[in-house]
Image (cartoon, helix red, strand yellow):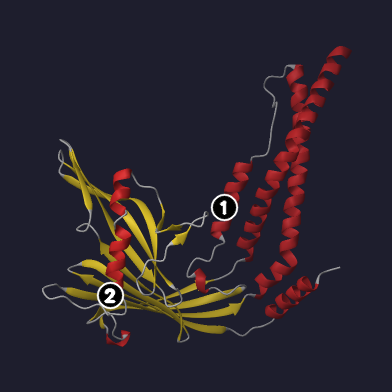
Amino acid sequence: MLSKKIIFGLLGYLFLAFVSCASNRVYVKTQDTLYEDDRLTTEVSSTSLDGKLQKDSIKNYYNLYEFENSVVATESKTTTHYFIAEKEQTSKSEYQMTNVYLVEEVFNRSDRTDTSDIIGKKTIRFNKNGKLAPYIDSNGAPKLAKGDSFSKDDEAMFSKIPVYLEGVFSATTGQEISEAAGKSYRTESVVKNIEVTSTPNQSFIMYQIMGKPFVILGTASWNILKCVGYALINFTGGYNAVAGKSNAAYWKLPSYKKAKEKAVKAKEANKIAYYPEYHLPFTDNHIVVTTVTGEKESLFVSSDEIKVKSTTRKEIDNTLSVSRSAKADAAQTAAVAGVIGTVITIPVSVVSWIGGAAFGIYGKTQN
């Protein structure tokens, strides 16, 4: 008998299938970015739904080159190591998570080129007051950071970073960012207004109830039949090997790799193309995105005070496809069945191959 959970689930699908009304939601995403002397220092972002705040964050960026760096010079190049830090705080988090990146900068004297790469990362945790909040390892011991291992010299440099950042964060906690004299500041602002209209796709819902089980069953059954076919082919292969038919097939197995690649492609083609985070299951979505970009006089003033530079508007449709979903379901089932089928087919095919060889030997003894 069907469980209550399955029964209620099916009833829910049937209810959705015949609901024709659409739901409307409005998301507003804002991002304000502060530059100090054209260097990124702060990002403030938020997302709201129908006027209610969903999530927010403040990211601060610190270049720690002046605090600590190491330089190694040779005849051909100069290699410099230093750190940059990225601190993120959300209103819902009790910690300020700070990623500290190790940067390697190389100056080649031959062509006078300068390249830089991030070669490692550690994460330090601070509380809302800017004080260090150590991690506890498996032995119960406190650790100031977790992440990649650095070289001995880089570890020695990094060891000074946590306490230094604690002093910086503790001194600035609760204070707004102020503009220092003699420096230039600008705040870039982007506001996206995303209107989402979701309408239940009745054909897709009915496919999930009525069609999908048969697609999965049919694909699984076909793959079982293919396993039988491979066994027969390998029976013939064993016979051909003994009979000396060098041009004939000796051995054949299903290709799991090809089945997996097909499943990945079908899954990719069936993905929600635009703003999947706002997609409601079993619905088609019409999305209108209005983007306003501009500048503000200060990082924390209202978005209404943006000096507008440009406004764009685009309309997008995310439409569910029964055909694409069926292909994805079939391909995924085939990939799973391919693994199981290969495991089963190999021993069965070995036995059938030996049987074919034995039949061939028997045939020779009769001639």
- Relative depth, front residue between 157 and 194: 157
Q: Where residue 64 appears, x then y in whole percent?
A: 24, 59
Q: Which residue is mark 2?
A: 172
Q: Secondary structure at mark 2?
A: helix
- The answer to whether residue 88 of the structure is visible from this angle is yes
Within 10 Å of the Cα at label 1, are there few (<14), some (14-19), or many (20+) other Cα atoms? some
Q: Where residue 277 appears, x then y in whole percent?
A: 51, 71
Q: Work out whether 233 lies above or below 55.
A: above
Q: Quadrant of the C terminus?
A: top right
Image quarter for residue 251? top right
Q: Quadrant of the N terminus?
A: bottom right
Q: Where residue 253 appears, x then y in whole percent?
A: 68, 35
- The answer to whether residue 367 of the structure is visible from this angle is no
Amino acid type for the residue under numbered disc 1: Val
Amino acid type for the residue under numbered disc 2: Thr
Q: Is residue 167 left or right of residue 349?
A: left
Q: Residue at x 72, y 58 (%)?
A: 215
Q: Which residue is mark 1?
A: 264
Q: Residue at x 83, y 21 (%)?
A: 358
- Relative depth, front residue between 140 and 151: 140
Instruction: Mark 1 or mark 2: name the one nearer the start of the chain.
Output: 2
Image quarter for residue 46? bottom left
Label count reads: 2
